[in-house]
Image: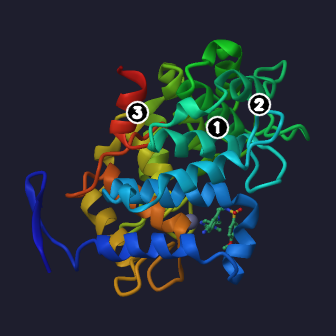
Amino acid sequence: PKQFLIGESCLIIMGELAAEQHAKYILTIEKKKDDVESVLMEHLRINGAYWGLTTLDILGKLSAVDQETVISWVMSCQHESGGFGGNEGHDPHVLYTLSAIQILALFNKIEVLDIEKVSSYVATLQNEDGSFSGDKWGEIDTRFSYVALCSLALLKKLYKINVEKAVRYIVSCKNLDGGFGCTPGAESHAGQIFCCIGALAITGCLHHVDKDLLGWWLCERQVKSGGLNGRPEKLPDVCYSWWVLSSLIMIDRVHWIDKEKLVKFILDCQDKENGGISDRPDDAVDVFHTYFGVAGLSLLEYPGLKAIDPAYALPVDVINRIFLN
Ligand SMILES: COc1ccc(S(=O)(=O)N2Cc3cc(C#N)ccc3N(Cc3cncn3C)C[C@H]2Cc2ccccc2)cc1
Ligand SMILES: [Zn+2]
């Protein structure tokens, strides 16, 4: 085992991050298109591309992919409405539109977009009460508020929507436990809490959050193995290393959890021979948990990983390039 200093304490880790194997795993699944899981994930292939490419960038390996091929495939998923589908020829949805914008941001190629057309597609999804629908079928969920606000912020087109009403709707979904649900009165869940906190962070409205009350609910997600779960009494899962941890960071309460034990939990979920990270130790790996595991380690400042922005879920250097020049 390797030793390295985290903060003041020296930590003996049970085997370190198998970065090379994880990069190889991501690059090979890009090639496999016809095996069963790839077909299952057909409808959200553009999400899978965002998860894989962001993992490669955090590992410092984004140059291993041919960006022209990726960019032309992403653009082939654009619908004439301006929104993006999960794959070529699929119906547009705000979830896939954000993934497209995030992928182009990774390659510093947002300018290939017709920004007016894409931002107008997203803006038309805002409802009278400030909430957002995911697509033309109208389902409302605070997930879509986050995805819409994140998309418009990255395109610098927030002025196209009513931000005050968007914030008011999100605050209307706050529960007595300090958490947030998918609609007003829905129970608190870590995934929805990430979306609501991320949206409030992007709009500069985190003053609406009771940070001690929510921080308490979030730090209670850590179980004795060091992993984080999504709700009380649930099993820990690596993807909550993102939903819970990024929320704790955004409300400045990350010191309320044991970071070293969480690092160890994530490292225990690796397949160190073939690459990839699973939801919990000894389960099957997948690109989703590989991304959220590596992104979680990045939030935990694991050595050798690029820093990721907790609100935008993109590397900090990508965010600086968009907002600071
Ligand atoms: C393996 O059964 C499944 C079940 C559902 C899905 S899904 O609806 O497409 N989706 C994305 C997802 C992708 C992969 C991968 N590769 C694996 C899982 C997973 N889940 C399921 C999951 C993760 N942790 C525990 N659970 C049960 C989340 C879900 C919803 C989601 C979509 C986009 C962004 C965030 C969350 C895919 C596979
Ligand atoms: Zn999971």
**Residue type, label 3:** Ile
Question: CA separation, marks 3 and 1?
Answer: 16 Å
> Quick check: 222 left or right of 121?
left
Checking the image for residue 319, the label placed there is 3
The type of residue carrying mark 1 is Val
Q: Residue 259 occupies which quadrant of the picture?
A: bottom left
- Please report whichever mark, 2 or 3, sits nearer to the chain's N-terminal start: 2
| Residue contact at pointers 3 and 1, CB within 8 angstroms | no
- Camera-near label (2 vs 3) is 3
- Is residue 209 visible in this depiction of the protein? no
Q: Amino acid at mark 2?
A: Phe
User: Do we see residue 156 in this rendering?
Assistant: yes
- In the depicted view, which residue is nearer to us: 104 or 164? 104
For ligand 1, tell me if the residue under mark 2 lies within 8 Å.
no
Residue contact at pointers 2 and 1, CB within 8 angstroms? yes
Vertical arrangement, residue 51 with respect to residue 181, above or below: below
| Image x and y of residue 271, in percent | 40, 82
Which residue is labeled 2 in the image? 132
The reply, left or right, for residue 311 in relation to residue 127 is left
Looking at the picture, tell me which residue is in the foreground, 104 or 40.
104
- Give the crowd class for mark 3: few <14, some 14-19, many >=20 residues within 10 Å: some
